[in-house]
Image (tube, rainbow, N blue to C red):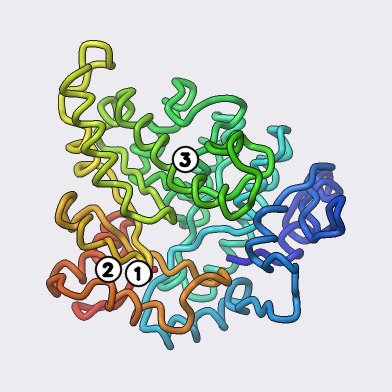
């Protein structure tokens, strides 16, 4: 999504509207967002607009906030169903106020629900959760699933309130997601203030982006598997999204090796780490992910879903599906169908439109 200002002016509770995200300039006169008195999205805006912060060439896709326009673009690409994630919503977790964060998540989820009502069989919502407050996260997941029709939960892999994703405080949330039968999905952003792996090494936005997405996902993957979260919650499903897929074979092999050698100092796991991943997890591949064939060879074709990254400016549009099929050259038709359709349908509990279903983004 590309959330419009009306999310916060029309959907956010009145008591919090003055503290909601709004456009501003940083100390260097560069565009960013102001959230509750804190500058956010400085790195994100740099990578969106380029080092010159040139709005002249920036043409955001209308489908990011207009469902009718999105459906037109989906039809042009050959995409039947889109599972939707935020853009500005990636950064609301920069606030350290649990009540504000919970209100921002409710507003975003309510707006997204109205967006999806334009075509509920094709536009699928995933709930933004306020992990600063675990009980509030559970209430919001239940509300979004049971009342808004959403098909999963979304949050960042970074620590919230200095709690890693595998912290024991989240055990009730994993129970809730497993009971509801919806996946938890992990999607990184480029944070200005949340703890982010690599931040102490680099200040350059592009270098931080290189590290933050895969490194935070790798840490989250290790935490959920090696600390026994997936062991304790065998029906919980987890998706690691928008960080590329090439890191996964190496990471699973490394975790397996450490489990074999050092299992006496690790929490008790009945299976190899890679087995938990294959049983309960998926990773996303994108149009320019040319290593996907190696991932299929090592992990199998049941653990990969496809993401278009639409409507972000670095996404392949038009041509996402065409570029993806080029990257998947050499894979069987059955494997391509799993990655482009049936794996996502199984993950989110979707009904595919027909036996000739096209991509799920």
Residue under the point 63% across and 62% down: 47
Q: Quadrant of the C terminus?
A: bottom left
Residue 350, percent from left and from top: 32, 63
Task: Count neighbours of disc 2 (C-alpha within 10 A) and say few if under 14, some if 14 to 19, many if 20 or more.
Answer: many
Circles 2 and 3 in contact, beta carbons < 8 Å:
no
Of the numbered discs 1 and 2, the one sitting upstream in the chain is: 2
Instruction: Kindly report the distance in space between the C-alpha atoms of the residues bearing marks 1 and 2.
Output: 5 Å
Q: Name the residue carrying label 1.
A: 360
Q: Does residue 196 sit above or below 148 in this rendering? A: above
Dot label at residue 341: 2
Circles 3 and 1 in contact, beta carbons < 8 Å:
no
Instruction: Kindly report the distance in space between the C-alpha atoms of the residues bearing marks 3 and 1.
Output: 25 Å
Q: Does residue 339 sit above or below 62 in this rendering? A: above
Q: Quadrant of the N terminus?
A: bottom right
For discs 3 and 1, the disc positioned in front in the rendered view: 3
Residue 250, picture quadrant? top left
Q: How many marks?
A: 3
| In the displayed structure image, the side of residue 340 where residue 52 appears, left or right | right
Nearer-the-camera pick, 48 or 96: 48
For discs 2 and 3, the disc positioned in front in the rendered view: 3
Nearer-the-camera pick, 278 or 348: 278
Q: Does residue 43 sit above or below 260 in this rendering? A: below
Q: Name the residue carrying label 3.
A: 216
Q: Does residue 62 sit above or below 5 in this rendering? A: below
């Amino acid at each position: 999504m590309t959330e419009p200002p009306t999310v916060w002016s029309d959907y956010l509770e009145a008591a919090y509207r003055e503290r909601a995200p709004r456009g501003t300039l940083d100390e260097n006169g560069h565009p960013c967002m102001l959230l509750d008195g804190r500058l956010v999205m400085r790195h994100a805006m740099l990578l969106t607009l380029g080092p010159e912060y040139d709005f002249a060439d920036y043409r955001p896709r209308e489908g990011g906030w207009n469902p009718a326009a999105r459906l037109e673009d989906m039809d042009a690409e050959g995409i039947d169903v889109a599972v939707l994630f935020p853009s500005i919503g990636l950064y609301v977790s920069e606030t350290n106020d649990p009540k504000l964060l919970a209100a921002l998540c409710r507003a975003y989820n309510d707006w997204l629900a109205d967006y999806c009502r334009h075509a509920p069989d094709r536009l699928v919502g995933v709930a933004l959760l306020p992990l600063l407050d675990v009980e509030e996260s559970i209430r919001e997941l239940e509300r979004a699933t049971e009342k808004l029709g959403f098909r999963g939960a979304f949050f960042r892999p970074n620590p919230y309130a200095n709690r890693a994703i595998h912290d024991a405080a989240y055990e009730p949330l994993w129970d809730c997601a497993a009971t509801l039968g919806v996946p938890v999905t992990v999607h990184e952003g480029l944070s200005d203030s949340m703890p982010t792996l690599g931040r102490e090494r680099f200040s350059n936005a592009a270098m931080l982006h290189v590290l933050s997405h895969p490194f935070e996902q790798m840490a989250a993957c290790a935490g959920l598997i090696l600390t026994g979260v997936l062991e304790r919650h065998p029906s919980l499903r987890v998706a690691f999204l928008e960080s590329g897929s090439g890191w996964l074979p190496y990471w699973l092999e490394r975790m397996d090796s450490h489990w074999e050698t050092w299992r006496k100092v690790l929490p008790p796991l009945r299976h190899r780490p890679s087995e938990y991943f294959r049983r309960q997890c998926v990773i996303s591949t994108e149009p320019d992910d040319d290593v996907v064939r190696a991932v299929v060879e090592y992990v199998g074709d049941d653990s990969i879903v496809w993401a278009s990254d639409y409507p972000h400016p670095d996404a392949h549009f038009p041509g996402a599906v065409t570029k993806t099929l080029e990257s998947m050259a050499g894979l069987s038709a059955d494997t391509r169908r799993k990655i482009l359709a049936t794996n996502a349908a199984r993950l989110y509990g979707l009904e595919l439109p027909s036996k000739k279903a096209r991509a799920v983004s």
